[in-house]
Image (cartoon, coloured by chain):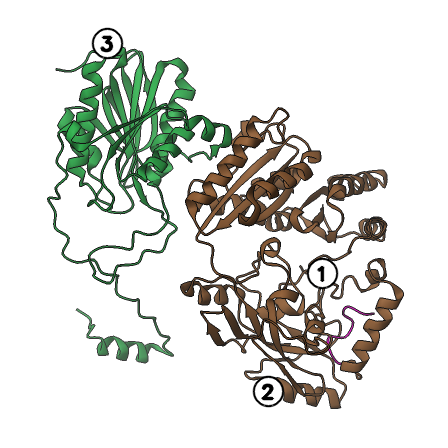
Chain colours: A brown, B green
Amino acid sequence: MGRFHGRSTTVLKPKTTQEVSEILKWCNERCIGVVPQGGNTGLVGGSVPVDNEVILSLANLNKVRSFDPVSGILVADAGCILQMLTDYVAPHNHIMPIDLGAKGSCQIGGNVATNAGGLRLLRYGSLHGTVLGLEVVLPDGKILDQLTTLRKDNTGYDIKQLFIGAEGTLGVITGVSILTPPAPQASNNVILALPSFDNVLPLYQTVKRQLSEILSAFEFIDRTAYDLAVKHGQGRALSDEDVEGAECFVLVETSGGRREHDEEKLNDLLELLLTADKPLVNTGVMAQSPAQFSSLWALREGVTEAVSKEGKAYKYDISVPLSSFKEVVDNTREHLLSKGLLHDKAVKFVLGYGHVGDGNLHLNIVADSYLPEIEEALEPYIYEVVSSHRGSISAEHGIGAMKTHALPYSKSAISIELMKKIKEVFDPHGIMNPGKVLE
Amino acid sequence: MRPSPARLLNILVPVKRAVDYAVKIRVNPQQTGIDANVKHSMNPFDEIAVEEAVRLRERLKGAVTSITALSIGPPKSLDTLRTALAMGADRAVHVALPDGAPAPEPLAVARTLRAVIARHNDAAAAPADRIDLVVLGKQAIDDDLGVTGQMLAGLLGWGQATCASRLEVDVAAGEALVTREIDGGAEELRCRLPLVVTTDLRLNEPRYASLPNIMKAKKKPVETLSPADLGVDYTPQLETLKVAEPPVRVGGGKVANVDELIAKLKEAGITAA
């Protein structure tokens, strides 16, 4: 993102868990800060040193350790790139339970350390559920081997859960055991154009009811986000008459075991939507080929890239009640307007998109350049809004270096105190990813 | 006998159901063909042909009376025809082959098209009802043979403009202006209708099928014909000896200096002439 810069002089690229252990032991004895780094695709500066810490890259820990095609359990080194694991399990008719835009460079260890969400969360749940075991090197060099492949294991505190989403502040994940679901045999998608945001929720209810188990994604893009994606060539645009009068768009994806069955369900849904007395959608398009399927997805996934091409982005990844998505985006825009910051040389666009199914809104503010006045106008404004909805200030991007100050908006004083105690237990010298998550 | 110049246009668009281009092709273990149990969709060049027919009608309004999509193939070819109908074709003709039948060869396809056009034009009450323009892909991406359009024009005695990157039709004058991409530039052809046009990639960018049109497409008529109805024989004239994957590409290497390069070249048997 270019917002965070460290002054590190040293990058270590260990090849084995044993080497990671020796590095941490050495650093711990000398109180040298260590920043574990995966694919470096995080959005909140979690993998960037804040000072001159040693960077510990997991890139060379990149072997698949085992895969059981019967249970679908994959055990891999932390440095394995997500796309590579996806390709690895594909011939066995399995897929990774997680998928995100950065799949070509992000690493599974980083995904787990940041508890990354992504596009398949609606269907397969979060990594807290799909990760079955972890191998972690603790700051003192001890290797915590919890790399089990058990679906069920109720034997006391589930320590591994602490490392999922700890962003490398408690230890270094070196191995991951993860449950991969069987690959769907048929996928389909449609983009629906909605006259008003108010229709998104009733539409979500209808879609859930009609598609039930084959629904695999329900993604929301507002008009500004759509227009930006099209402007920057992300996916092929819908025709002018299809987008006319649309305030927002919804991408619905189905994945199932039998194409005819899925298509029948999807067709029934579309017929219902189009023939209703008060239609929830203006119109929509359905992919007719894998190429169109990807092209429709690109309109949604490409928003991130379009935003970075358009200008400097302030990205807020928040969980708020679904019904307040539009309100949050509109109020932010008006708030900026009232501060006189909504013009060519300051904030150019305020847009919202995200995972409706997960209650996760990506609120992006695209500015001409990063300006202190914009930041002041946005924070703590947005955090207060989120807090008033009892939402989360970071739904899937984590806290990193960027949001440590804002943690109290989502976590109570008691929670934060407990978090600090846990950190003290695992990392008494404070060498692990200093300055991240907790201030 | 050439039909008199038409004042109204009826367009025939043949479409082929082919393995989707995004699918990774796998040769079957017997090396007799490829694994066909993968995602199929409309041959991309044919999709461009359907799009162009629909755009012609959007430009020429009432002058285009009908757009007929035609496909030869197993029952699943109906899906491809439905896509064509959802994009804007009015009616479809399905020449049904049993599942697993060998893919028809270009000459048999061209004969089929000729027979369908003859049936249609013989039944036409007025000259305005005759099919006088066939727009089809320049090739199918599965067999890459790329000769069906030319064979059809030859069989019908019609003009042909292949690899079109631009198509304009003047219905009143019974003429079409076609731009073809050729080596080093573009060639413009003025052709008299009736005409066979094959499409190249740059002709247009096909639209998505919109939901209302997908619904409408379900109600559009599809006529099913058998090869016997048309008197066409699909017995293959070509024999496939073997299907094999291309040899795996061997990675290159780096050399430190010119001497090493020359040594490597000599080793590989390459010498200066």
Q: Distance between the residues labelled 1 and 3?
A: 73 Å
Q: What residue type is labelled 3?
A: Ala
Q: Can residue A232 be seen in the rendering of this structure?
A: no
Q: Rate crowding at label 3 as few (under 14), some (14 to 19) or many (20 or more) other CA atoms within 10 Å.
A: few
Label 3: state its secondary structure: loop
Q: Residue, x 79% and y 53% (percent of image)? A: A391
Is there a contact, CB below 8 Å, between mark 1 and mark 2?
Answer: no
Residue B6: percent from left, percent from top: 26, 12
Is residue A73 or residue A328 the one in the foreground? A73
Is residue A145 or residue A438 the one in the foreground? A145
Residue A5 vertical position relative to residue A170 in the rendered view, above or below: above
Image position of A217 (left or right of B123): right
Q: In which quarter of the image is the N terminus of chain A?
A: bottom right
Residue at the limit of the structure toward the right, as seen here: A413
Is there a contact, CB below 8 Å, between mark 3 and mark 2?
Answer: no
Label 1: state its secondary structure: loop
Of tags 1 and 2, the one toward the viewer is: 2
The quadrant in which residue A4 appears is: bottom right
Q: Is the magenta stretch mostly helix, strand or loop?
A: loop
Q: What residue type is labelled 2?
A: Glu
Residue A227: percent from left, percent from top: 61, 38
Q: In which quarter of the image is the C terminus of chain A?
A: bottom right
Q: Residue, x 54% and y 78% (percent of image)? A: A61
Q: What stretch is highlighted in magenta?
A: A431-439
Label 2: state its secondary structure: helix
Q: For mark 3, what is the residue?
A: B125
Q: What residue type is labelled 1?
A: Arg
Total numbered labels placed on residues in the image: 3
Of tags 1 and 3, the one toward the viewer is: 3
Q: Mark 1 lies on which chain?
A: A
Q: For mark 2, what is the residue?
A: A19
Q: For mark 1, what is the residue?
A: A3
